[in-house]
Image: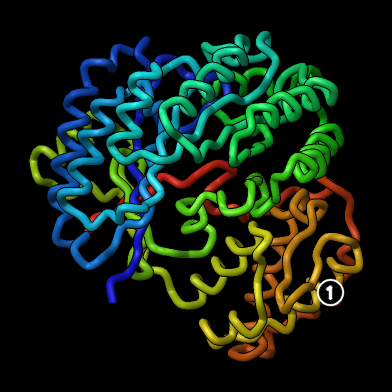
Amino acid sequence: MEKKIGIYIHIPFCKTKCAYCNFYSLSSSEGEDKLISDYQSAVIKHIREYSAQLDGYIIDTVYFGGGTPSYFGASRLISILSALKKNGHVLLDSEITAEINPGSISKEDLTKLKRAGFNRLSIGVQCADNSTLEALGRGHTFEDAEETVEYARQAGFQNISVDVIFGLPSQDKELWAQTIQRVAGLKAEHISCYGLKIEEGTELYAFKDSPFFPDDDDQADMYLYAVEMLARFGYKQYEISNFARRGYESKHNMKYWLGDEYIGFGPGAHSYIGQCRYSFTEDVGEYIKQVGDDHTIVEHDEQMSDFENAGEYLMLRLRTTHGICEEEYYDIYRLKMDIVLELLHKYEENGWAIFKDGRWRFTPMGFLRSNILIGEILEAQTKQRNLISKPWQMESVAEDVQMTFFDKRPVTASLFGERRLIGRNEFS
């Protein structure tokens, strides 16, 4: 029986670079437009080289991320998708997503994408306040977002996702409430709410200590408000940052959170195949050159152990409302989670986790603390293993886990960050 797999295609080009963005991309102001055609050819060539590896899989999700795929152009996106269809088994009902920015694509091009097989759009709205959008370098207004959604509906798209960000400069609770209400008014099928991360190397990093950014308590309030209000508007939370109407959860992103296999193409891309992880150089020019010269383009590779995969089961599934199951964990990895369960019971007492229908999951308050809590759970998992293999190293975990939001330095436990993974890998 053929296995299902997801494909990610990274489009590392933008008209302008947003002030908060730390994803690998090049803006037109950097003189990178001339690389676009060469990059299109390189990705298509790379897909052809993968035809033998793809032959044993059914492709049920395809995701074009970036960067700004809509800036890359509808015709180029279609040519890459066509190459994937020719060299892989893409299901007729595959979820095929393209990220777009408001005002960056015409109704005609949206119609072309729909006719070519694209059936889902992810629109970067970010907020409803035009002055904030301008300060972030977004290059569009909220009215542009409304128009783009309308054009997408006219083109036949029935699965639309929009992204919004909380914790933006000068964004108070009232402005965030307006964003949630106006974005809900777009009547998209899916909404992603991300907390702003001020990363080194971005324009905003120079202002990281500015008092104009909402503090931790305000950001926590914004997050909890979004969870509550989106539920009222009919959007069920299914992951820390993602909400959807019934049946419209992102099938592609669920592959990352459930530990399924995926392959990606492009610079800076990662893949997970057969317990192996691979990643590529974050350099468009080098990617084009190496693909053209038939050289390997793997920069990092890692063979995952069973114990590491068990850790990812805990780490990734606890990002979702599906959560984890003791019996399922044992059936897959033949490992017990007694010490993990001790922690989960303490979290339950604090209102951070719940146990229902045989599964443990975090509450919205737990999701707020998820980096800390998941870090503790991974430590408990290691102690569980030591209890079996090296009992003399075992330490008591009966510690007080009472804490307040952000009162400890978070453990970096979110493998792919708050947005989405860029996936790709090379086979010998």
Measuring 56% from the left and 69% from the top, which residue is drawn there?
313
Let me know if residue 241 appears in the view. Answer: yes
Q: Image height check: is 247 above or below 284?
A: below
Left or right of 198 on screen, residue 46 = left
Q: Position of residue 178 (x, y in %)?
A: 78, 22
Left or right of 412 on screen, residue 333 = left
Let me know if residue 300 appears in the view. Answer: no
What amino acid type should be assigned to the residue bearing mark 1? His
The residue indicated by pointer 1 is 345
Q: Nearer the viewer, residue 341 or 211?
A: 341
Q: Residue furthest left?
A: 293
Q: Position of residue 292 (x, y in %)?
A: 10, 37
Q: Position of residue 210 (x, y in %)?
A: 75, 19
Q: Image height check: is 354 above or below 142?
A: below
Measuring 63% from the left and 85% from the top, which residue is drawn there?
327
Left or right of 85 on screen, residue 240 = right
> Which quadrant of the figure has residue 329?
bottom right
> Which quadrant of the figure has residue 198?
top right
Q: Quadrant of the C terminus?
A: bottom left
Total marks shown come to 1
Q: Nearer the viewer, residue 311 or 131?
A: 131
Mark 1 residue crowding within 10 angstroms, few (<14) / some (14–19) / many (20+): some
Measuring 23% from the left and 37% from the top, which residue is drawn there?
80
Mark 1 lies on a secondary structure that is: helix
Q: Image height check: is 32 above or below 262?
A: above
Q: Quadrant of the N terminus?
A: bottom left
Q: Position of residue 416 (x, y in %)?
A: 52, 49
